[in-house]
Image (cartoon, rainbow, N blue to C red):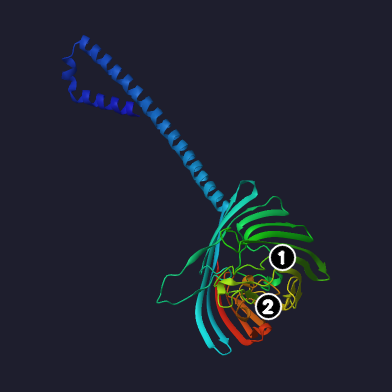
Amino acid sequence: MMKKEMLAIAAASMLLQGSAAFAAISDQEFAQLKADFASMAQRLSALELENSRLRELGKGTESSLAVVTKELASVQTSAASSWTDRIKVKGDFRYRYEEIDVQGKGSRERNRIRARASLTAKLANNVEVALGVASGGDDPVSTNQTLGGGGSTKDVRLDLAYFKWNASDQFYLTGGKVKNFWYRPQKSQLLWDGDYNPEGLGAAWSSEHFFIRAGGNWLESDSKKSNKQFSWGLQGGSEFTLGQASVTVGVGYFDLSTKGKASFFGDDDDFYGNSFECSDPNNLSTCVYKYNYEEIEVFATMSMNVADLPLRLFADYVENLDADQFDTGFILGAKLGKASSPGSWEAGYAYQDLEADAAFGLLSDSDFAGGGTDGKGHRITGAYAINKQWKFGFTWFLNNEAGDNRGSAVDYDRFMLDTSFKY
């Protein structure tokens, strides 16, 4: 196209100069003009061909760039997908209003929060590593933080730090500050408070109908301290159907050799309901545990549907083989419904009686009858789900009695109203 346009321009220019101009040009000059014109046409043709090649090259470059861009986007998407597949973040937040009424001390009200977050990374060879933080102080059985102090900042502590090796679909090994892996019927806190995370090693095996769990944890691992102590436990059970019901039964044994050891947490005389003795009654630093805690546990759970609602019945029993009195404890309860989907609800009831030396008090329920052992009474619970992540609930420790085994029983009631969120 460009060649034709140039020829037309040259021809027009020549015509405008008129015939006189042609007459003044010799045959030799005209021949030279024709040669020059042919040379210019050849150069124009070459330029047009080069221009065409450049256009084709540009189209190829654009196509290649599009391919590269698409591949880069694919790699980025794949990397992002890989990251989300390997890293999981979850947590929860709870706001609580609490009222406590203790005989002889009047009532107490407070507002508390609990915030927890954890990150789990999946590594090669079916290994995962987790890190979790939680509000609260260094209490091993509570991550609550009381509001107040003029708006002071609140503590956040390391709550989880562990590895877990899933050697197969049936067996895993874990170590560190781990999630509590012991089976607890209907999340019973007779032996283990819900906020307690063991520190040590654990292993679990399960099949379609049976499970075994074993572990050891440090009550104190520092040999510089006089109460260095490692405890261990073994638990096994069976899961089967009985008519329309699903049943889990099992036994456990836990060995905590605490006799003659000083308190593991808190003040020198903090034994959380357990019996202790002091070589010098005037010097609390000489107080030590009176017994070991060689705990035999028997538990059962039955789940079924009643009027299209899930119903769970549960029982947990413990006896300390080393104590010679006040050595048994149990909890019996039921729960109807499940507050999970929007508009769903649940209600529960349990009766608990945990004698002073039936279980290791430091790690048992920190709310029932003031916490620890040597308490009995009722617990009523209820919850309603706004959606899958948000629900309201309450827990009422009604007519609890604390300290009965020592002849100084006091009435202890506690009411907790919660709103909680999961993410």
Q: Nearer the viewer, residue 317 or 239?
A: 317
Q: Quadrant of residue 9?
A: top left
Could you say where residue 112 lies in the image, as x and y percent from the top left? Answer: 51, 76
Q: Which mark is residue 303?
A: none
Q: Label 1's element?
A: strand
Sooner in the amino-acid sequence: mark 1 or mark 2 = 1
Q: Nearer the viewer, residue 96 or 36?
A: 96
Figure quadrant of the N terminus = top left
Q: Nearer the viewer, residue 181 or 198?
A: 198
Residue at left offset 77%, top offset 67% = 251
**In this rendering, is residue 345 above or below 80?**
below
Residue at left offset 68%, top offset 83% = 405
Could you say where residue 236 lies in the image, as x and y percent from the top left? Answer: 76, 63
Q: Nearer the viewer, residue 36 or 66?
A: 66
Residue 159 in sight from this viewpoint: yes
Q: CA distance from mark 1 to mark 2?
A: 17 Å
Figure quadrant of the C terminus = bottom right
Could you say where residue 107 lies in the image, as x and y percent from the top left? Answer: 53, 88
Label 1 vs label 2, nearer the camera: 2
Could you say where residue 117 lies in the image, as x and y percent from the top left? Answer: 53, 63
Q: Amino acid at mark 2?
A: Ala
The residue sitting at the top extreme is 28
Q: Which mark is residue 356?
A: 2
Q: How many marks?
A: 2
**In this rendering, is residue 302 above or below 208?**
below
Q: Amino acid at mark 1?
A: Phe
Residue at left offset 72%, top offset 60% = 213
Q: Which mark is residue 254?
A: 1
